[in-house]
Amino acid sequence: MQQEVVEPAKVADHIKPHRGNAELFFDPNNLQSLCAACHDSTKQRIELGQVGFGSDGWPLEPGV
């Protein structure tokens, strides 16, 4: 997930949700840096299936 806003990343996010799987949880290749706002809003909505994606692969805003 990439946006044009640049700010310090403060969260180590699991790219593929681990859902209790220790192998995915501890896999360093399954981690990405995100700012807290992206992790706590956009990423959570994606994991809950509440966000669609455009043909360019970017998340669509709600209602789009």
Image (cartoon, helix red, strand yellow):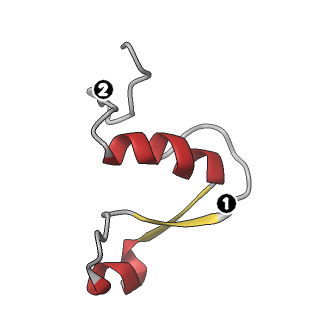
- Residue 39, compared with residue 15, is above or below; it is above
- Name the amino acid, label 2: Gly
Please, what secondary structure does the residue beneath circle 1 have?
loop
Q: Earlier in the sequence, mark 1 or mark 2?
A: 1
Residue 20 at x, y percent in the picture: 29, 76
Identify the residue at horizontal 32%, vertical 33% (top origin): 50
Relative vertical location of residue 24 with respect to residue 2 in this rendering, above or below = below
Residue 15: % across, % down: 37, 63
Please tell me whether mark 2 sits on a helix, a strand or a loop: loop
The residue carrying pointer 1 sits among few (fewer than 14), some (14 to 19) or many (20 or more) residues within 10 Å by Cα, namely some
Residue placed at 69% from the left, 46% from the top? 6
Quadrant for the C terminus in the image: top left
Q: Residue at x 38, y 77 (%)?
A: 29
Mark 2, other Cα within 10 Å: few <14 / some 14–19 / many ≥20: few
Decide which of 10, 50 is in the foreground and name it: 50
Residue at x 39% of width, y 86% of height: 26
Q: On residue 59, which mark appears? A: none
Nearer-the-camera pick, 1 or 64:
64
Q: Position of residue 3 (x, y in %)?
A: 55, 40
Observer-nearest of 50 and 60: 50
Q: Left or right: where does residue 42 sit relative to residue 19?
A: right
Res. 9 mark: 1
Identified by mark 1, the residue type is Ala
Q: Report how far apart the C-alphas of labels 1 and 2 lie in the structure.
A: 25 Å
Q: Position of residue 60 (x, y in %)?
A: 39, 25
Which residue is the site of mark 2?
54
Residue 62 lies, with reference to residue 25, above or below; the image says above
Residue at the farthest top position:
63
